[in-house]
Image (tube, rainbow, N blue to C red):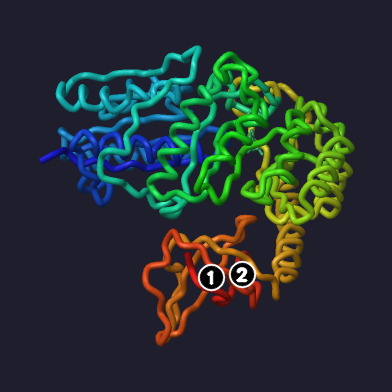
Amino acid sequence: MGKRFYIVTFGCQMNVNDSDWLSRALLARDWREASGEDDADLVVLNTCSVREKPEQKVHSALGRLGTLFRDRPEAFAAVGGCVAQQLGPELLRRYPFVRLVFGTDGIAETPNALEQVAREPHLQLQLLDFLKAYPEREDAWDGPAAEHEDSPGPAQCFVNIMQGCDNFCAYCIVPYTRGRQKSRHPEAVLRECRRQIARGVRDITLLGQNVNSYGQDPGGAGMGFAELLHAVAALPGLERLRFTTSHPKDIAPEVVRAFGELPNLCPHLHLPLQSGSDAVLRRMGRKYDTARYLGIVRDLQEARPDIVLGTDIIVGFPGETDEDFEQTLEMMRTVRFESSFSFKYSDRPGVAAVNMKPKVGSDVAGQRLARLQELQNEITSEALKSRVGALETVLFDGPSKVQSPGAVHWRGRDAAGRVVNVPFASSQIPSDLAGKMMPVRIMEAKKHSLIGEKAGEPW
Ligand code: 5AD
Ligand code: SF4
């Protein structure tokens, strides 16, 4: 019987995607998935250090594992991702039950390294070297499928198109933990997309730290991002295509135009603004100002009038004044992002902003964050209300988390990515809708989701 593993994932979609792959690669090697840390022979922590909070979570998880493994000397842990890249050798010293540390460039070698440390009880290994080219991974679809709890529905998947980042925004640790930008060869991207479509995937998200600069390193074999988008969109059977994350300074006019040209490119874009103050954007090293950002928004809306925008905002960047912050709120009101992720600035080791002054106090940053999130909630709620009456196509993930007596609720997403729940009376419960698409009339808006009713047959 194979050994049992359990993977805990922190942080971004790239980590979720890496964990999904690792899980499949281990299943293909005869490992089994444990139901939790308690009955696992191996616990993998895939870590994030982009902000202080997720990094703290890794240390508390390691503390917890130390206690758990005290009576089970055969059990061991592996730590991957950004914290491993940053602190690898220190983690091996401090936590003897950690037997492997691997960075994002080391993940392709991780399944074999895990087998090796499982065989040799006193071995500790590190896979922390940065590579020059995108490390292609084995195709792990042949093993039994593993579903991570954050995995998308059965008809959705993420396809990596690059790793690393060259931008060095003043607050950001990513270029240090994920290394230089490395584009994946377009043929490898297309091969994986075709393979996924053949498995029943209908919705693909192309993933990278800054997808708009895809191909601006030798890995893209001369293909730029707009060309790659057109090539993926043309694959037969692909109903929905999206991409994340974008940097406003790199979004090319051809990519903006693609929203009007490619019917299966979904009307949704996550476009991190970070701040609405030109002075702060300059200090952040973002290389665009608010006028340029608004110009991109205008062009996107021209190309695709129903486009829905989401963003990331940092409050309390060093030197941010009340006035700078008011400008951020003003940009939120102007662009009317339908969703946003917002964070209090936190110092990260080695980034340029560590030396920038004055620091904004945590209380002030906290108040700003609360005001920003309140404004976002108002905008989100108005945007969702305006959908009532609309006819949308919903791609179902699975049954809704919340059910009610006398009905079965299914959960899916419309083309723009909004969550839509559809209740079916017990007299008309459909057979499995997971992975099916269906026309739905929107009847009601909740705080963060919509409720609709069946308006046509599923396919
Ligand atoms: N402090 C706070 N937020 C940060 N982000 C990145 N670095 C920091 C930091 N040091 C945010 C940015 C980025 C998102 C992934 O995390 O908004 O877009
Ligand atoms: Fe970090 Fe800036 Fe690169 Fe995004 S673009 S990963 S914020 S350095």
How far, Cα to Cα, is label 2 from label 1? 6 Å
Quadrant of residue 425 in the image?
bottom left
Give neighbour class at mark 1: few <14, some 14-19, many 20+ (Cα, 10 Å): many
Of the numbered discs 2 and 1, the one sitting upstream in the chain is 1
Q: Which corner quadrant of the figure contains ligand 2?
A: top right
Does residue 149 appear in the picture of this structure? Answer: yes
Q: Which residue is mark 1?
A: 421
Direction from residue 431 to residue 189 in the image, left or right? right
In terms of depth relative to the viewer, which is nearer, 120 or 370? 120
Which residue matches tag 2?
A: 450
The crowd level at tag 2 (other Cα within 10 Å; few <14, some 14-19, many 20+) is many
Q: Determine whether the residue tagged by mark 1 lies in a helix, strand or loop.
A: strand
The reply to whether the C-beta atoms of the residues labelled 2 and 1 are less than 8 Å apart is yes
Q: Residue furthest front?
A: 236
Q: Position of residue 363 (x, y in %)?
A: 71, 47
**Which quarter of the rendering shows the N terminus?**
top left
163 left or right of 285? Answer: left
